[in-house]
Image (cartoon, rainbow, N blue to C red):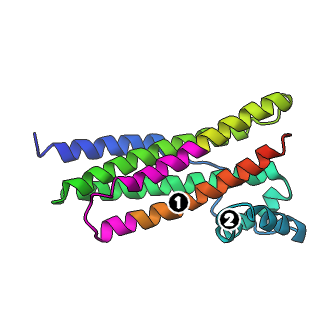
Amino acid sequence: MKTQRPQLLFSLICATLLFHLQPIPAVRDDPDPSGTTNDIEFIRTSCGTTLYPDLCYTSLSRYANAIQQNPARLAKVAISVSLVKAQRMAAYVSNISRQADYGDDPRAAGALHDCFTNFGDAVDEIRGSLKQMRQVGGAGAASFRFQMSNVQTWMSAALTDEETCTDGFEDVSDGSVKTDVCDRVAKAKKFTSNALALVNSYAAKGTP
């Protein structure tokens, strides 16, 4: 039975990953970089409200033509970008979890499996935020506040789940896997944090 356990765990991971990693068409690999000077400046100024303004600008200015000067579109694209990053992180952790199952450090294997679960939850929450954002603005101010509250709650939960991933590595010995995972998680968290900041900024306007 012990020899079957790693295979079973990997099968469960793959099944979960297939559920989480559905394509999101809002962000393309080849965005149209064109946009007016005002469109680009709008993104630069908006990114100034985030914790990582340079990363925010470089990741979102590629979509200036689609965003134009619309704060709702900006928030949606930022959420979409953070979703892609979370999906890629989940795929990466799934891959190295398989290798860790055959390693000699059960704590590292456990931390990786927990991290995958956390990022799977984050993917669901960011996806829910994006779905809600696409419905915002159709039924007045009260509905707008309720919908944006949902988006903020889910994005905050996603950021917490991503942070929880690295908590599991506190008891894992230092090494290349731990360092690589923590570095990648830190980068993914920045995208989620920026998206949440732009969502909060849009919500503060009080109108769709």
Q: Residue at x 11, y 43 (%)?
A: 2
Q: Quadrant of the N terminus?
A: top left
Q: Which residue is rendered at x = 81% and y = 52% of the image?
A: 71
The numbered disc on residue 75 is none
Circle 1 sits in a helix, a strand or a loop, which is it? helix
Q: Position of residue 104 (x, y in %)?
A: 15, 60
Return the residue found at the far front.
170
Residue at left offset 45%, top offset 48%: 119
Asked whether, in this view, residue 173 is left or right of residue 3, the answer is right
- Could you say where residue 49 lies in the image, as x and y percent from the top left? 74, 61
Q: Which residues are magenta?
A: 156-181
Looking at the image, tell me whether mark 1 or mark 2 is earlier in sequence order: 2
The residue where tag 1 is placed is 188
7 or 150, nearer to the observer: 150
Q: Which residue is mark 2?
A: 56
Q: Would you say 176 lies left or right of 6 here?
A: right
Question: Which quadrant is the C terminus positioned in?
Answer: top right
Q: In the depicted view, which residue is nearer to us: 10 or 129?
A: 129
In-image side of 19 versus 138 (left or right) = left
Callout 2 amino acid: Cys
Inspect this view and state whether residue 22 appears: no
Image vertical order of residue 1 relative to residue 162, above or below: above
Residue 96 visible? The answer is: yes
Q: Secondary structure at mark 2?
A: helix
Query: Is 95 part of what is drawn in magenta?
Result: no
Mark 1–mark 2 Cα distance, whole angstroms, equals 12 Å
Q: Main secondary structure of the magenta part?
A: helix
